[in-house]
């Protein structure tokens, strides 16, 4: 067994006195899509921010290829090969689409390869090609999300972290973007760690999944198992289960509590 | 009534003075956009620049231009160090503490300059003397013309730098969305220090160019407050707005002094108050609200 590409070991992160992450472990192997699911405030975003150095963990380790990278500056972590596509897109509003993409490749110096990857991004997101000279602020939400993913790809990272790419998008757009995420994984061999509230679509594209609740991991497993699990069905996918007595489970209790 | 030729003369002098304010305001705006810190010691960078040129040309006997070059670069280094060693540690503290810190820097720089260079006013020999005359109406001293030319050069150079170079685009990116810039692997901390260096360098250049026109003493940094007023008039979020506001103030000043000697010296602030009443976001505001 080779070491996983990214490994979080027993991470604890505080916001001031509040413990936001209570000892979480997770691993991502090369070539995988791994999804982290959870409701608002479960600590998913905090977990990603801790992994890329935007927040410092108080305990535990973040290992990239076996090397400890926790509590460093995020730009240092990015240069190590993790591209973080933040929640809410966070494009550079006054830069053109092309400049936004170029910033993704800030630490690459092979001009030809960067130009080629720029074409690759335009091939995956044809809408962006027509908008290349437009300021990112004037793009629609979906276009900004595509730009943010493209910008992350431009770094040619070892690992791409996506924080809620479905946020605020229409169901059709969500399908489109997740289709492209799958293609990036299959065709470009990109390893992806995905954080989502939209459990349904996230479990469809991912190989494995983790479920977070109030700062801790409560479940993990292959995505096709998770999608079949009763708790996931009821609490994240909203599917109703008819009981033997023709009623829904009346105690709203999850089996892990 | 003022004869027409005098009107032109006052206006040209005003534009030159406004350009000097504008060069200082450039630094204010650059640093503000990069870090949301208003550097109240920025005028002192200008004062230090004037003294650096003076010291180099007096102590080493260098000509104006070599002293200018080395003087401005060394003040740029001072700007870098101020950010990298001190300001970086206080970022994230309350605005009030940061404000007091920059004001304190102003006092420290003034005191240092006084201890090193003396408290008396000194004069610097102008690199050019004489004046340029176009027809009978327009005439301008070369040393003032130089300030206008230098401002144009700096603005064009800065524009090219921020549009065309990877480094410049990254500085803009970092000022627009610092966290995203970090995530892209852009060394934000170093770029912010570079922004301080650039701002300090331009302010020092303004000081050095003004030195032959006015005299140099430790209080000329107070001009920075007028530059700040100009930047507020024009709109603090934009380089061109700040420049325009400064030139406006520079032109209004000599006329106000002439017609309303009662408010001599405060006309800049009167204009600033008027603009703040009518258009609090400045004449050329940065029009963009973050999309949700």
Image (cartoon, coloured by chain):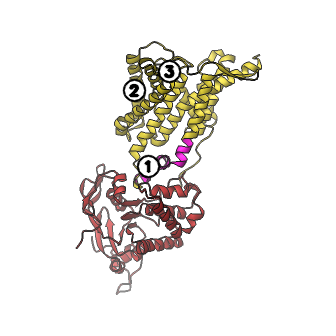
Report the predominant secondary structure element of the magenta stretch: helix
Q: Which mark is residue B100?
A: none
Label 1: chain?
B
Q: Mark 3 or mark 2, which is nearer to you?
A: 3
How packed mark 1 is, by other alpha carbons closer than 10 Å (few <14, some 14-19, many 20 or more), is many
In the image, residue A111 lies at what x, y percent?
47, 58
Q: Residue at x 72, y 21 (%)?
A: B7
Where is residue B45 shown, x and y percent of the image?
45, 28
Question: Which structural element holds mark 1?
Answer: helix
Q: Is B176 covered by the magenta stretch?
A: yes
Q: Nearer the viewer, residue A197 or B129?
A: B129
Q: Which residues are magenta?
A: B158-182
The chain ID associated with circle 3 is B
If you read the primary sequence from the N terminus, does the residue marked by circle 3 or circle 2 appear first?
A: 2
In this rendering, which labeled residue sits more in front, label 3 or label 1?
A: 3
For disc 1, the marked residue is B178
> Drawn colour of chain B?
yellow
């Amino acid at each position: 067994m080779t070491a996983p590409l990214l490994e979080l070991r027993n991470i604890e992160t505080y916001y001031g006195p509040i413990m936001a992450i209570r000892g979480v472990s997770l691993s991502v192997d090369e070539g995988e899509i791994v999804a982290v699911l959870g409701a608002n405030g479960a600590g998913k975003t905090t977990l990603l921010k801790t992994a890329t150095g935007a927040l410092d963990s108080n305990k535990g380790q973040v290992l990239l290829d076996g090397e400890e990278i926790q509590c460093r500056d995020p730009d240092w972590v990015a240069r190590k090969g993790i591209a973080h596509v933040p929640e809410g897109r966070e494009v550079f509003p006054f830069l053109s689409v092309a400049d936004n993409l170029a910033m993704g490749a800030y630490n690459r110096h092979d001009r030809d390869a960067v130009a080629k990857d720029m074409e690759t991004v335009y091939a995956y997101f044809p809408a962006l090609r027509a908008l290349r000279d437009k300021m990112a602020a004037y793009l629609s939400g979906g276009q900004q999300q595509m730009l943010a993913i493209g910008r992350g790809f431009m770094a040619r990272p070892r690992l791409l972290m996506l924080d809620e790419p479905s946020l605020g998008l229409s169901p059709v757009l969500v399908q489109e973007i997740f289709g492209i995420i799958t293609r990036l994984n299959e065709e470009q061999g990109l390893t992806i760690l995905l954080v989502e509230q939209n459990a349904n679509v996230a479990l469809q594209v991912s190989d494995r999944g983790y479920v977070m609740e109030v700062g801790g991991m409560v479940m993990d497993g292959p995505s096709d198992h998770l999608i079949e699990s009763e708790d996931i069905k009821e609490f994240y996918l909203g599917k109703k289960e008819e009981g033997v007595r023709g009623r829904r489970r009346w105690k709203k209790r999850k089996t892990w509590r | 009534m003022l004869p027409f030729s005098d009107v032109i003369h006052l206006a040209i002098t005003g534009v030159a003075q406004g350009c000097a304010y504008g060069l200082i305001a450039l630094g204010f705006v650059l640093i503000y956009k990069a870090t949301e810190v208003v550097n109240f010691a920025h005028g002192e960078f200008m004062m230090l620049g004037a003294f650096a040129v003076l010291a180099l040309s007096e102590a080493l006997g260098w000509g104006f231009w070599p002293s200018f070059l080395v003087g401005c670069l060394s003040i740029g280094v001072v700007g870098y160090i101020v950010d990298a060693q001190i300001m970086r540690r206080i970022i994230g503290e309350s605005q009030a503490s940061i404000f007091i810190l920059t004001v304190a820097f102003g006092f420290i720089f003034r005191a240092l300059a006084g201890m090193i260079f003396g408290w008396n006013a000194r004069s610097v020999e102008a690199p050019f003397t004489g004046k340029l005359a176009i027809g009978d109406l327009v005439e301008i001293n070369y040393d003032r013309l130089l300030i206008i030319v230098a401002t144009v050069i700096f603005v064009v150079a800065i524009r090219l730098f921020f549009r065309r170079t990877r480094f410049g685009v990254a500085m803009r990116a970092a000022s627009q969305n610092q966290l995203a810039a970090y995530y892209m692997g852009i060394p934000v901390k170093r770029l912010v220090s570079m922004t301080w260096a650039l701002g300090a360098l331009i302010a020092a250049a303004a000081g050095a160019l003004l030195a032959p026109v006015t005299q140099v003493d430790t209080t000329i940094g107070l001009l920075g407050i007028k530059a700040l007023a100009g930047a507020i008039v024009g709109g603090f979020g934009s380089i061109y707005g700040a420049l325009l506001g400064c030139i406006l103030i520079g032109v209004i000043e000599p006329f106000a002094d002439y017609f309303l000697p009662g408010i001599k010296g405060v006309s800049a602030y009167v204009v600033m108050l008027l603009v703040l009443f009518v258009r609090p976001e400045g004449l050329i505001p940065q029009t963009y609200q973050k999309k949700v």
